[in-house]
Each structure stands twice: as structure tokens, then as C-alpha cells.
Image (cartoon, helix red, strand yellow):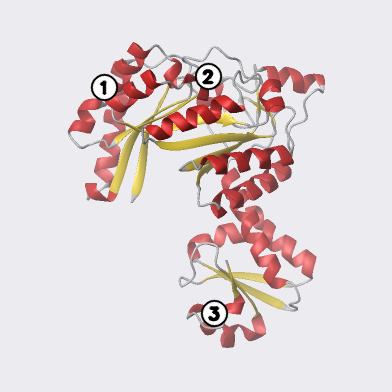
Amino acid sequence: MRKYNIPIFVPHKGCPFDCVFCNQNRITGHIKSVTPDEVTDIIERYLATIEAASTNRNEYIIEVAFFGGSFTGIQIEEQSALMERVEPYIKSGRIDGIRLSTRPDYISREILDNLKRYNVTAIELGVQSLVPEVLEASNRGHTPEQVKAAVSLIRKYDFSLGLQMMTGLPGDTPERSEYTAEQIIAMKPDCVRIYPTLTIKDTALETLYKRGEYVPETLDEAVELSKNLLLMFEAAGIAVIRIGLQPTDEINEDASVVAGPFHASFGELVESAVYYDIARTQIMGMTGDIEIYVNPREISKMTGNRRSNIIKLQKEFNITVKIKGDSNLEKREVNCIPARNAIAMLPKATNGVGGEMRCF
């Protein structure tokens, strides 16, 4: 089932805190607050495109997504005024529900009752870290206990729950990020987002960085850590729906990103790192030319950015690597075969026999 989000950004609305990393106006690319009339206009524009491109309404889900701020920190009357504009589309069946992002300390029974009234289906909480020292150094304004209390209350209302975490915050370490992931797994969310910290213009973090009081993750460090977190969540059966901030006019190296592990295809780099590890494990002990088979849709991930995986494997093992497609393979299935044996062994690998040549 394909899913579409209609994003409606509420920049820094409802949030009195100035987290060290935060400049929501630059992060979202939106400066002024959205009005109810604009909500209707945005929905109409997106629906026109979605409906024109799709022939079977039963094959996709559409949700309006209020992102970019702390939605439930807005006055409840204003929350209702924005959500009321979505209600007619839900009643007509053109939209399936509403999802929103907010802070864990802006969750209460009154708020959740109101969200349920307007057919909110999913709530994402900006957890960022579950280490008290990291939360304090980042000026988050909430505690791990408030996160756990909010999660418990949301679960009583049967909303779909997403949790967002960040890596590379002030005072953070890879070990602390993995601890946060472990705590998130224990809370059993339906989905997770992983955001490596970027140093954005006009934030407290930029000041700390320029003073030499904050050292951001390198791109390689952030990819390696995000890879480990991704595998942790997947092993626990939790979907990771995004890794890295969405590039915008502001979020790129030529605009508001001062420092940090920015890459326009950060999630792809992480997936490529997973594929590299799988292939590397298989290739150990092989010599000569190697053919690596993956699903055709996954070839770019196995190849790596600018052929980085091929280059690393060839250099480490002193071999020649060719990557080829095999539609019988699923995502993360990799067959590494010595070229001299490829003709004889490939049928075994693709029909389920000779499984020792396949790793997952």
C-alpha cells in the first residue's frame, strides 16, 4: 500500500524552547505561520497531483501531516481550526487521516481527546535523546521520564506512534545514541526517524561550534552510527521511515548548513553501508574477479555513492568487482560469486538451492 503525506509546516509554532540545534524557519524552509485557508489550498494542490497520477484509490493512503513545530503546543482552538479544514476531506474519503509531530511534554488527555475528535491517526514525538545530560546540554526542556509518560498516554488512545531521535547532539556519544535507541525499542513505537545533528545558521549550536565548544559528527561517523541504529530498530521489528533531514532550499551546504554530516542522499549512504558489510562478509576468502548479485532496484545501494563500495572492496581484497542484477533476490539479499564459478553457481543461488552463497 503506497502512502502519501500532504505536508503542512507550522514553523516553531507552539514551542517556547530554543533547542541549541533549532531554527525551525530555516529547517522547514517556511517563515510565516500557516492559516486555515492555506491548509485548504495546500490540500487541494496535492490532491490534484495525487489523484491525477493514481487510478485506484484503494491502492494508497493519504494523510495530512502537520510538521515543523510543536503542533500540540499551539492553543487548542488554533489546533482545531487547522484540523477542521481537513475534516471534510476525511468525511468524503479523499484523505484517510492526520499525522503530526510534537514534543513529549505537550501531551495530555485534553489534547489527545481533541486529536482523536479530528481523526488524527499518528503522532510523532521529538524525543531526540533519552540521556538526561544530552537533553540538558541541548536545552530540550523535557526529561526522559516525560517521554515515557507521553508514550504511555498516547498508547491508551490507540494512535500510531512514531519517535524521532538525533545523533551527535552536545554531550552525545555513539554509545549514548545506542542507549537512546535501546530505550526507544523498549517503548515499542510503530516507526522511528533518525536525524544526525546539523549545525544550522542562527542557532546556539552555531555559536558553540564557532567557539570550538562543539564538534559535529563527520559524515563517515554519522553514516556508521546511523547504520548501526537502523539495524537495531529493524531487528526489533520497528520501521525506520527516514534517516537524515530532507534537503530543502535552506538545508544544504550552500545555504543554512554551517557544519555537520549533511548529504542530500544521507539515507542512501546508510543503506549502501549495510550492503557493503553484507558483501564484505561474503567476499572474505575469495580471490580473483567477483560478481555481486542484488535485486536490480538495489544496484545503486550496492555500488555506493560514486562507486565507493566497489572501490573499497577492490582495494581491501585486491579483487575486481562487478555488480549485476538478479530479480529473484529480495532487498538486502546479496550473492557474491567468483566469476569463474558464476555460471555454475548462479542458478543454485537464485532457485533457493545452495543457500550458503546468499546472505541477508
Of the pair 285 and 314, the residue shown nearer to us: 285
Q: Which residue type carries mark 3?
A: Ala
Q: Amino acid at mark 1?
A: Arg
Type of amino acid at the residue the image marks with label 2: Asn
The secondary element bearing badge 1 is classed as: loop
Label 2 with label 1: CB-CB less than 8 Å: no
Tell me the SS state at disc 2. helix
Vertical position of residue 95 compared to residue 357: above or below: above
Mark 1 vs 3, N-terminal side:
1
Q: Residue at x 79, y 65 (%)?
A: 316
Is residue 304 shown left or right of residue 112? right
What is the C-alpha distance between the residues marked 1 and 3?
A: 54 Å
Depth check, mark 2 against mark 1: the one in front is 1
Residue 78 falls in which quadrant of the image?
Answer: top left
> In the image shown, does 108 or 196 lie closer to the viewer?
108
- Distance of mark 2 from mark 1, alpha carbons? 23 Å
Q: Which residue is mark 2?
A: 25
Residue 85: which disc? 1
